[in-house]
Image (tube, rainbow, N blue to C red):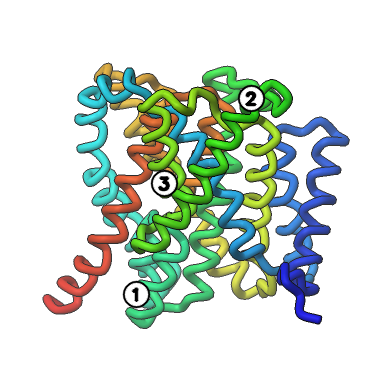
Amino acid sequence: MPNLWGLDAPRLTAIAAASVGVGVFLLFGWPLPFLFGPMAGCLLASLAGAKLRGMGSVGDGMRTILGVAVGAAITPALIQDLPRMAVTLSLIPVYLIVVGALGYPLLRRGFGLDHATAWYGAMPGGLQDMMIFGEEAGGDPRALSLLHATRVMMVVMLAPPLLWAFWGVDLHSAPGQPASSTPVGQLALMLVAALGGWRLAKAVGLFGASILGPMIATAVLSLSGFITMRPPAEAIWAAQVFIGLAVGVRYSGVSFYELRRFVLAGALLSMLLALLTVAFAEGIYLANLAPQLEAFMAFAPGGQAEMTVLALLAGADLAFIVAHHVLRIVLVITLSPVIDRLWLRKR
């Protein structure tokens, strides 16, 4: 009898490791148990030699919850406030130029990676996109996977302590209202926006379809006054579990050589990007262009899903933060292959 859910041994092992991680974090009262627990559990299981695998389309489906949460934050008042973002959005290309100027030499000369792996490893785009572009250019897909997984993990691990230390964000608070207080009609509309938006976005080939499709569909319903609430806390917690699991399983089968070279390279690159993010955020804040918290989270080079989770927990301006991350990913996806080809042609 076929396994309709695709729950083979590696996936069952990943679910078990994630569940243990959540349980340990809840037991000790550690912050972000539904995000850090699965991440830590799957990471430790991977380092112990267990073979893990991500949840595929089920994991993508859980990301639609985050798209709905962001779309619900897009209101008429926000549209009127869009001109305020223009200056900070224009700084994203500058940020990416500096990232490339610092990150590429670190990976190319500091760790001796080939050109394609160093270039696409330094670009803070989506993990899947950078792996595809890098492999097509002759790069090492395994190295790219570990570099970007480490970048996302490091940013997600470094951001919460900074949020607590500098802005007093309560990382133990619920990310939304309970499901019991969310009207059934609102839940139904959210479900339609999540699944319908995801399907339409996939049909037209939109990048990040599982987040951006539901976000656009929910934004339309929010601006027209039909959706007036965010997804309940339980749904966002569930999405966190799958996001944490997806990051942790990237280290499945990692060797000591890969730890010493690729993971270390990713960790050092992440520290460099963290310092750069702090510098940009401080400059934006001092120029009175945006609040310090929003500026920091808008330029932090984490994954779109992971940064959305942190923004929800921090109670920050979701639309402001997501707009900057979407622009960053769009620019990286569209321009990094073009610049790479022009560079090679010139050489």
Residue 155 visible in the picture:
no
Identify the secondary structure beneath mark 3: helix
Q: Amino acid at mark 1?
A: Ala
Q: CA distance from mark 2 to mark 3?
A: 42 Å
Q: Quadrant of residue 120?
A: bottom left
Q: Residues within 10 Å of mark 3 (few under 14, many from 20)?
A: many
Q: Is residue 140 above or below residue 234?
A: below
Q: Residues within 10 Å of mark 1 (few under 14, many from 20)?
A: many
Report which residue position mark 3 lands on: 273
**Disc 2 or disc 3, which is closer to the eye?**
2
Identify the secondary structure beneath mark 2: loop
Q: Position of residue 58 (x, y in %)?
A: 63, 59
Circle on res. 227:
none
Q: Quadrant of residue 219?
A: top left
Which of the two discs, 2 and 3, labels the residue nearer the N terminus? 2
Q: Position of residue 212 (x, y in %)?
A: 41, 48
